[in-house]
Image (spheres, helix red, strand yellow):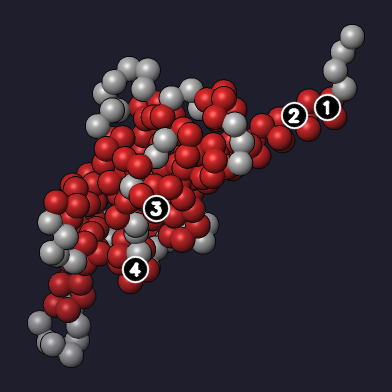
Amino acid sequence: MSTAPGTNRGTYARTAERRSAIARAVLDLVLEKGHGGVTTAETAARAEISEATVLYHFPTRDHLLVAALRLAFDEDDERLSSGQPDVDLDGLRRYVIGGNREVALLYTMLAGYTGTPGHPAREFFAEHYAQALERWTAIIAARQQAGLAHPGIDAAEAARQFLAAWTGLRTQWLIDPGFDLGESVVTAFRRSTGENVMDLRRVLLDPAIGL
């Protein structure tokens, strides 16, 4: 006896909806208490389901935390980009400043498990980094076309260096939040893309200066 296609679609939809509700419950707990305050029992209570159901969809606490981080990044993507391969540096600065400290702490904690085979964070970060590298390579290439980024750089390599700098700066900021993270990230982007050099070139070629 076969199962009707509509029944399968309904089951998949309910599963996706339940997983989404669980991820939302975990992220809300992270924002309220930090990742150290997340438990499967409290997640179940927040999502209004049984703890057994939570563990059916996310077998370990680390799976729950990765789901919360994925949701946080999905929502951040909507803040950062309108779908166009470009970025305004003032917008980037505001985006960085608007980031949540608890999410940054969760990111840093889970990133430490990327070298652990079988850990759920490993797959997430591999996927996240590949998407981020593709996005920022396209952004830098677009800025090269617009004459903003240096035409002689390799866009993918510049994107890789920028992402590494951003990650390092965020870690330093978590240790010592006494500097402007948004400004530092924008400075790292301009240096990685050669935009500071291009600005100097435009000044030197300005007819009003006469050089």
The kind of residue on which mark 1 rests is Thr
Residue situated furthest top in the rendering: 1
Q: Earlier in the sequence, mark 1 or mark 4?
A: 1
Q: Which residue is mark 1?
A: 7
Dot in front, 3 or 1 = 3
From the top left corner, tell me how far across and down residue 99 is, in percent: 34, 59
- How far, Cα to Cα, is label 3 from label 4? 19 Å
Q: Which residue is mark 2?
A: 11
Q: Is residue 161 left or right of residue 24?
A: left
Q: Earlier in the sequence, mark 3 or mark 1?
A: 1
- Residue 31: which numbered mark, if any? 3
The answer to whether residue 153 is seen in the rendering is no
Q: Earlier in the sequence, mark 3 or mark 2?
A: 2
Secondary structure under tag 2 reads helix
| Residue positioned 26% across, 41% down in the render | 108
Residues 119 and 64: in front is 64
Dot in front, 1 or 4 = 1
Dot in front, 4 or 2 = 2
The kind of residue on which mark 4 rests is Arg
The kind of residue on which mark 2 rests is Thr
> What is the crowding at mark 3: few (fewer than 14 residues within 10 Å), some, or many (at least 20)?
some
Q: State the count of labels.
A: 4
- How far, Cα to Cα, is label 3 from label 2? 30 Å
Q: Mark 1 and 2 residues: CB-CB less than 8 Å, in contact?
A: yes
The kind of residue on which mark 3 rests is Leu
The quadrant of the image that shows the N terminus is: top right
Position above or below: 165 against 126: below
Q: Which residue is mark 4?
A: 94
- How far, Cα to Cα, is label 1 from label 2? 6 Å
The answer to whether residue 115 is seen in the rendering is yes
Secondary structure under tag 4 reads helix
Secondary structure under tag 1 reads helix
